[in-house]
Amino acid sequence: MKQRPIQHRKLIMNYSVINFLKKSLLLIFLVVFTLFALITSTAYLSYGAFNFKIPASKNKLLLGDSKIECAINDEIFSSSFNLAQSGSCYFYSYIKLRETLKHNHHIDTIVLGFSNSNLEPLRDDWLIGEKFISFKLRNHFFLFNTSDYQYLLKANFWATIKNTSQVMLHNLKMILIGYNGLGGFLSLNRQMDDDDLKKAIDIEKKDVDIAKHQLVYLKKIYSLCEKNNLTLILLSAPIHNGSKQKYEHYTTSLLSFKNQWMKNSVIINHQNFELENKNYADFMHLNSDGAKRYSTFLKNNGFANL
């Protein structure tokens, strides 16, 4: 007779635990659903309100990382639109290209940074590294389609999940700042110093390994250009003589990859463009004076091989 109250209390406790778990799961579901709704709705809003239009006089779209970002002043080389950005792997260049082309049918030439360093394994970290996911995802998410997000999830699941919640405010911010949040010419006002020169001289050569994610999206960029009948120029922008030693062993790989997978593209090698030390911000980037000299050359000569 005394066991019944105990059994009854156990039943009440079990019911309370189950009820608590149900409410907790419901709360988690509501939070996740609300976050998903806010993320997707702000992304749709941002995409719809974003001003994708590029002036009709600018028929050349420049993409790539900081070497292109700092090398070409598109106010001087006025037929170009510089959308390169530091730390950009080909994954983000592809997404920007795909979405920009939908709204700018006058673009007929794509200039993509294609220097020796772009295929080194470190460049894959620019896609899968948490620091880069945090930095890049926030401003590019509104351009993503489902496949883009799935690819990033497979590349680094937890870092992608962790940093997705931040995109809500950045989605809205992109409406205000426009293309400036995706790239643009960066004027560097410093000059290369003795420490930079020493770094350039002391660079250690490495074995030749190829960045697999870079190759995947380099092919996608080429395919997109072929589909839209665009000229794809693979540009090696000027770099300091010292830094060429580090990456010279990638040159054969670049040419081989181009000849095998991107036969209709054009390689333009301007790494030997004549500049002085004072025209460099460091051994990989031009400063504002160097960019002025190089951009003026492009304005007068176009993308001619040296």
Image: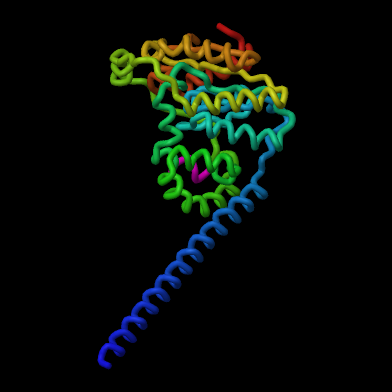
- Tell me the magenta residue range: 134-139
Q: Is residue 138 magenta?
A: yes
Query: Residue at image x 58%, y 53%?
Result: 40
**Residue 266 image position (x, y, % from top left):** 61, 13
Residue 145 against residue 228 in the figure, above or below: below
Residue in the foreground of this view, choosing between 296 and 245: 245
Residue 193 against residue 55 in the figure, above or below: above
**Residue 69 image position (x, y, % from top left):** 51, 28
Query: Residue at image x 53%, y 27%?
Result: 216
Residue 127 against residue 238 in the figure, above or below: below
Kindly give the residue lying farthest to the bottom in the view shown.
1
Is residue 97 shown to the viewer in this render?
Answer: yes
The scheme the figure's colours follow is rainbow
Q: Quadrant of the C terminus?
A: top right
**Residue 106 image position (x, y, % from top left):** 74, 29
Residue 74 against residue 245 in the figure, above or below: below
**Residue 265 shown left or right of residue 273 in the figure:** right
Q: Quadrant of the N terminus?
A: bottom left
Residue in the foreground of this view, choosing between 2 and 109: 2
Query: Residue at image x 37%, y 75%?
Result: 17
Query: Residue at image x 53%, y 61%?
Result: 33
Q: Is residue 65 magenta?
A: no
